[in-house]
Each structure stands twice: as C-alpha cells, then as structure tokens.
Amino acid sequence: MVEFTFLAVLLMVPLVYFIITMGQIQGGSFAVVGAADQAAKVYVAQADAQSGRAAAEQAALLALADYGHPPQNARVDASCDPADCMASGSAVTVTVHLTVPLPFVPFSEAFRLNASELSASATQIVGRFR
C-alpha cells in the first residue's frame, strides 16, 4: 500500500501539472483568436487609423481579460494593405501575441518561465459604406 501511494503521487503530480499547463495553453489560443477577430472588426469600424489602432488594442486587451490574461502579457500589432488603412477595400490585419506563463510558479515575474508564446491574426476589409 505504501509503495502504491508513493508511486501514484510520484506519477500523478507531473501528469496533473501537464494537464493544467495544456489547459492554460488551449485557453490562451482561444483567447488570441477571439481577441484578434474582435480587434480587426473594431479597427475597420473607426473613422480614422489613429482611433482604429487605439480601439483595436483596447478591444483585444478586453477580450484577453475575459479569458483571464493580464494586459502585460499581450501585444497587439496592426498592418494595412495598401498603406492607407481607411481607404475602402483596404485589408486590415491585426495580430495579437500572448505569452502564457507556467501555472503555479512562484516569483514568475523574476524567472520569466513561460509555457508558450501564442499569436493569431485576423483580417477585415474596410467597407465602401461606413
């Protein structure tokens, strides 16, 4: 009985930690996809490129916060093709980058131990009629 208990703890603790870490990564991947999609939609709905970038970043950070990810772990990039972002027919691509830290690591700010670096992109076309 003692051997079974010792081996069960020895084998189950890493397995449970692995499952929790994979869950954090999966949740982060859902978060970046949703954040990128919402940010691109918000960007093309704005009147000018400056307010579009600000609104897209705010929408992405709000979507990531809904999944429990703090804003300091995220970065939002936007690019346009052609360079005039608000011309009708322009493709606006928003990319959201997220760092997923390892769960239950004390002093994680000092060690910077990350489980994964995730990113997702979404593209929206600026409509002719806004």
Image (tube, grey):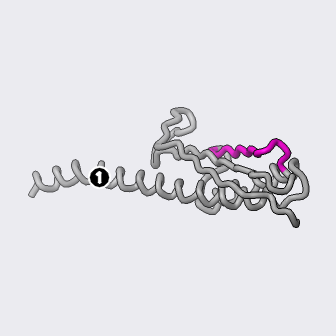
Q: Residue at x 22, y 50 (%)?
A: 11
Q: Nearer the viewer, residue 52 or 125?
A: 125
Q: Is residue 80 magenta?
A: yes
Main SS class of the magenta portion in the image:
strand
Image check: 69 left or right of 15? right
Count neighbours of disc 1 (C-alpha within 10 A) and say few if under 14, some if 14 to 19, many if 20 or more.
few
Q: Residue furthest right?
A: 47
The residue nearer to you, when weighing 39 against 12, is 39
Q: Secondary structure at mark 1?
A: helix
User: Residue at the spot x=41%, y=53% of the render?
Assistant: 22
Residue segment shown in magenta: 73-85
The quadrant of the image that shows the C terminus is bottom right
User: As rendered, which of 59 and 122 lies closer to the eye?
Assistant: 122
Q: Amino acid at mark 1?
A: Leu
Residue 95 picture location, percent across and down: 66, 47
Please state if 23 lies on the left or on the right of 14 as rendered: right
Q: Which residue is mark 1?
A: 15
**Is residue 75 inside the magenta stretch?**
yes
Q: Position of residue 83 (x, y in %)?
A: 82, 42
Residue 57: x and y, percent?
Answer: 75, 51
